Every structure is written in C-alpha cells, then in structure tokens.
Amino acid sequence: MCTECNYGSCPDLININVPGLFGSNVFNEKIMKERLPKETYKALKKTIEMGASLQPETAAVVANAMKDWAIEKGATHYTHWFQPLTGSTAEKHDSFIAPTLDGSVIMEFSGKQLIQGEPDASSFPSGGLRATFEARGYTAWDCTSPAFLKEDAAGNVTLCIPTAFCSYKGEALDKKTPLLRSMAAVSTQSLRVLKALGNDTSSRVTSTVGSEQEYFLVEKEYYLNRLDLLTCGRTLFGAPAPKGQELEDQYFGSIKDRVSAFMKDLDIELWKMGITSKTKHNEVAPAQYEMAPVFATTNIAADHNQLVMETMQKVALRHGMVCLLHEKPYAGVNGSGKHNNWSLSTDDGINLLEPGTTPEDNAQFLVFLCALLKAVDSHADIMRATCGSSGNDHRLGANEAPPAIISVFLGDELSDILFNLAKGEKAPKKGDAFLKIGVDTLPELPKDNTDRNRTSPFAFTGNKFEFRMVGSSQSISGPNVALNTIAAEALDEIATRLEKSKDINAEILNIIKDTVKNHEKIIFNGNNYSPDWEKEAGKRGLPNTKTTVDALKSFITPKALKLFAKYNVLSKEELHSRYDIYTEQFSKHINIEAQTAMQMVRRLYFPAAIRYMTELGNSMAVAGKSASVQKELLESIGNLLTSANKKLKKLEEETIKSQAIDKVEKQAVAFRDKVRPCLNDLRADIDAIEVLMPSDLWPVPVYSDMLFKL
Ligand code: ADP
Ligand code: MG
C-alpha cells in the first residue's frame, strides 16, 4: 500500500507484488506459525481442524499475538465482525487501550475478548427469539475463518474477528451459526458414506463454494440525484434508453479504463484481505460487471463474499462511482445474481463431485451425484425459499432468468450414463462397453464446455454444482445452509443403506436405480427459459413458486422443520423467527419503495411536468394558431398527470392499508398484491411523461445517463 495516500492502487505503485500483497492483512497460517509458540499453534490448529475446544490459556496467547501483529500493522481497534439477519455485516469497534494507574494507557487484548463479545444487540432482528429486556446476544469467535484487518480510506485499521452471533440461550441470531452447523452435518454424513465405500483416509469433508458476484456501476453524481437508487437500490421510474443490451456488445467486452481502474483497486483491496479475486469481466447489461474468486471452504467463502460486496461499494466511491448490488437496478436490462458454485471436498483433497478415473472413484462420484439429485428433488422448495427477497422477485419467475422452478442440469452424457445404469443397459454410444459399477470407469465426460446449459438454476458443471438463483445482494449463507443440510439428509439415508449392505456394488446400483425412479423428474437438460418448460415442469409436479412471500413458507413446513431439526442446523423456533424476519423484510422493502415513489412523484415529477405545462401554455399564447405541437403535448401530459395522480392516490391508500395489517404474512401478501401493482402502474404514467419532457426540465438522471455515461 502507498504510505502517502493510503490507497492500494496509488499511481505511484506501478508494479504490484501480488504474492507479497496477498493476505498481508490476514492473520493466516503463515503468520500464526511465525508468531505463536509451537504448542499454542498446534492447539489452535486442532481446534480449527477438528473442532477441539479451545483452552483459555491458548486463547490468551493467540489474542496477544494477534494484537501485536495488528498494532504493528497500524490497528488501534478490534471488532467482533458478525452477520445478523439483516443480510449485511455488523461491527462495533473497541480500541485496545486499557488505562493504567499513572494516567497512561497500555494496549490490551485478552483471550476472553477474542473468544466472546457482548454487543448490545437489541436493534438487530431476532424474530421474537430475544425479548428486548434480555437484549444482549453474544458473539463467539469462529476460528475457522481467519481474523483480518480492515483498512479504510481515512487510515483506520481495525482487527476483525469473524464471529457467530447467538442469544444467551444459544439460539442463532445470525447467518453464520447455521452455516457452521450445516457444514458439520454434511461432513458427518459424507464421512459415513465414504467409510462405507471403503475410504478410510479422509477424516473431514467440507463443502466448498465459489460465488460469482454480479454488480452495476453508476456515476456517483447520478446516483445522488436519484432518490430511488439512494433508498431502494433500484430505479422505480425511468423510460428505457434507446439502446439496451440487444447488441450483445457489453458481455466480455473490453473494459473501460475507468472501470478497469476500479477493478484494479478492488483486486488489491481484496487480495490484501486474502480474498482470491480471480476473474473480472463485463456482464450482459450495460454498466454491469462480474467478479469471481477462487472457491474456498463455505464459511470462509460466505465471509469473503460479504467483504467483496462491502469492498466493491467502498472502492467504487473512491472512483466517483457507486456500486449497485440490487438484483434489478434497471427495468428492461438484465438483473444481477450470484452464481453459487458448490461441491464437497475431503481433507485429503478429493473433490467428491469429480468423476474419477478409477472404478472406485466412479462409484463414489455416482453415489454423491445420486445424493444430490435426491436432495434437490426432495427439497427444491427450500432451495427456492433461500433465494427469496423483494429484489430477487424481479428475476425469479418474472421476465428474467433463471426461472423459479428448480431443476438439475446434468448434460446428456451424464444423464445417459445414469439412466442406462438404472436400466441395466449398455451405455448408448457406439463401442461403449456395459458399465459395471466398481469394475469399469466412466467414459470421459465433457468438462466445463463453453456451450453448456446456462439456463438451468442448478447445473452440474463437471466437478461441482452451480446454483444460479441466488440474488446479487443477498448473503450466500442461506442457500449454502440449505445445500449442506439437504445433502446431509440424502447422504445419511444412503450411508445407512450402504452400511447395511453385503454387496456394495449391487447396493450402489440399487441406489442409482431408486434415484432415477424416484427423482428423474428433477433432471432437465433443455432450455429452462422456454415457456414449454414451465408447462412440462407443471406436469412433472415440480414446484414453481414465483414470489418470495409464497416461497418463504417452505421454511416452516413440517418437512423443513423436521429436516433442519434432525441435523441440528435450525430449531423450530429459529426457523419461525427467520420466516418472520424475512417476510417482514419483504414488506419493509416494498413499503420503502412506495414511500420513495410517492415522494419522487410529488416533489420531482409533478412539479417538473407542471412547469413544462406552464411553458407550453405561455408558448401557446405567443404562437396562437400555429401552436399545434404545444397543444398536443399539453393535452398528452395533462392526461398523463391526471391519470398518474389517481394512481398516486391509490398507491398511498393501499400503502396505508397494508401498513396497518399486523399479521406478518397477511401484510406481506398485501404489499405484494396491492402495493406492488400500484407502484408499477404509477411508473407507467411517469415514464410516459418522461419521454415527452424536455431533458433540461426532467428532474432526475435518465436511463441513458446511468447506463451509458461512465
Ligand atoms: P462461469 O463459467 O460460471 O462464469 P467461473 O469460472 O467464472 O464460471 O466461476 C466458477 C466458480 O466456480 C469459481 O469461483 C471457481 O473457483 C468455482 N469452483 C471451481 N471448482 C469448485 C469446487 N470444487 N467447489 C466450489 N466451487 C468451485
Ligand atoms: Mg457462472
């Protein structure tokens, strides 16, 4: 980092030493090895890898080493960094200072301060889990995600301790706690399967995730002049620009210098925090981009994704731009998602979703593949629910991909292999021998080919599954809690079968047969965007839940309560609280949109239109008979204003009515069915006025400004 200006990409820093920079703000393995006494290091490693409980003496030594390291790097404060159910992150900074008797201070950080914190958490959503009179939740160190330093442009350096956030009774109040629990569940069940298959070398299985993050950039000045972007993160109004994404010239297009400068800075900031930013490119819509890191253990990937979103926003501001993470900032062009690439990996480096080259590997691969098919088919509704948000409603099931129907893409080759195995038939391709589990190897599968299906919400991409429904602004924890837990359940059942069987290969074949018989309906290799698929999926009985309000109910079905309780991931109370919070969040978001729309119409659009009408009226007085254009415009705008005014009143009325409903679900239904349509109706009139108005009188930046002027 440049010591003059504190910025990673100060122009003075022409050559970046990436390996030197990478992880320089992380209390990582290397630093721990250097700075911790051997015994402490070993004990900590044992806790990290095996979940052994951490002794207070060890914590004290680690805390001290962490503090010294952080202070050397300029830190004055530390924070327990956590992820409440708002979906963003929370931090409260405490300085290291401790006063001494002589009036001076020393810098202190105890083991207890490292392990546990007690933020006054009364203002975080708890969904009734924590009454305000017992407001204190506590934060507990997640030592499996390394501590790191956060720097800001003002030069503050803060030691961040990743933590889980729970109530005093131990109920999860955050996104991390269930994620860690689900990781434990999927590890346990995977190991049982591996053991039954004869693998004795692996002692831990972790789910791995690489999440591709899509985002938009917009000129800061435009952003500040759009109340809707400021308060809702998306435009509530705006006529389409003359050009959208139809020329397909943005995707993978050459990156503009200004954006490139931002991306470079972003990389530097992410690399410092040990985030493996790997791929960057232009996305489909104008002013839309993507960043993908190299995959990591799920809880680290989730922590990192939160930091990615935060850092994108901070770095964009330094470049005079604003980063929009909303799922649908602009109507008429693509919205943003997050592709959640997921797999399972053993501690000795085996990717369990990698088709192997030996018969044993194949058997293992096929078993895990079957588990996933079963899991997804049995709990498609839960997966869908984890992607529900008011923002994502504009993508899923609306006019945009991916559809709200969950299906699995396997590709023709793999599907054929599976179906033929189930039928006990030859593989279809000429020359292919009869495939015998435990004896033969799989034919080579096409890996990650570029023309693979990009329309599937859950696609097998060679050695992992890609869950594409996730919204761009949401935490990836929820979707991965679901994936881990549903996988755990399916693996549990398979493990039991394998453990009981006398002939493993025969049992694997039976598992494949049963999976195909019971879950074939979840496999779809065609075009998920076509209307035919919706019909076909309906015939197959696959759920097609188009709105968040309906989708969220899948969190509290008897099936979901049983599943999450069985694997100790979320209790009944925890699920109900989450359901309430997310449903309420939906209502709150639509309410903010309604308030914003009303303000913009009253304070910006109506006054502008009325001013123009006055101008037109004056001009008519001057022009007399030849004022036909003025007359026409005046009439059109006048009519639209009258209509908009009616719709504005209706919006106001419905909003007030919805606000008064006290049942969480009923209120969300009202916001969805009554308020949201009013918002869309009002928008139609305002957008129609916009195209008739002179640009100098239009009070806000328009789509062509926001999408093309960067
Ligand atoms: P796409 O073709 O979908 O744009 P990218 O190459 O941009 O794919 O991203 C693929 C993502 O998948 C990367 O984040 C990559 O690290 C991740 N990935 C690769 N292997 C695994 C794995 N075994 N587990 C989880 N994620 C993985
Ligand atoms: Mg992708």
Image (cartoon, rainbow, N blue to C red):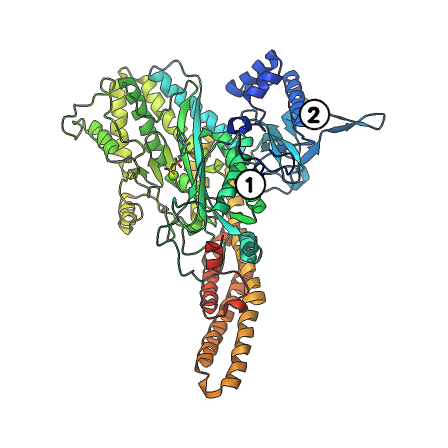
Q: Amino acid at mark 2?
A: Phe
- Vertical arrangement, residue 340 with respect to residue 646, above or below: above
Residue 227 is situated, as x and y percent measured from the top left of the image, at 56, 57
Count of numbered labels shown in the rendering: 2
The residue at the far left in this view is 430
What residue sits right under mark 1 in the picture?
Answer: 310
The residue at the far right in this view is 102
Is 453 placed left or right of 92 in the picture?
A: left
Q: Quadrant of residue 591?
A: bottom right
Which quadrant of the figure contains the N terminus? top right
Is 129 placed left or right of 240 in the picture?
A: right
Q: Amino acid at mark 1?
A: Glu
Could you tell me which secondary element the residue under label 1 belongs to? Answer: helix
- Nearer the camera: disc 1 or disc 2: 1
Could you tell me which secondary element the residue under label 2 belongs to? Answer: loop
Q: Quadrant of residue 168?
A: top right
**Front residue (pair 130, 24):** 24
The residue at the far top in this view is 39
State how far apart marks 1 and 2 are (Cα).
Answer: 26 Å
**Front residue (pair 446, 169):** 446
Residue for point 47% across, 25% down: 184
**Label 1: how many Cα within 10 Å (few below 14, some 14–19, many 20+):** some
| Mark number displayed over residue 125 | none
Residue for point 21% across, 27% down: 421
Q: Quadrant of residue 207?
A: top left
Respond yes or no on whether mark 2 lies under 8 Å from ligand 1: no
Residue 214 is situated, as x and y percent measured from the top left of the image, at 45, 43
- Vertical arrangement, residue 543 with respect to residue 117, above or below: below
What residue sits right under mark 2 in the picture?
Answer: 109
Residue 571 seen: no
Residue 44 is situated, as x and y percent measured from the top left of the image, at 57, 18
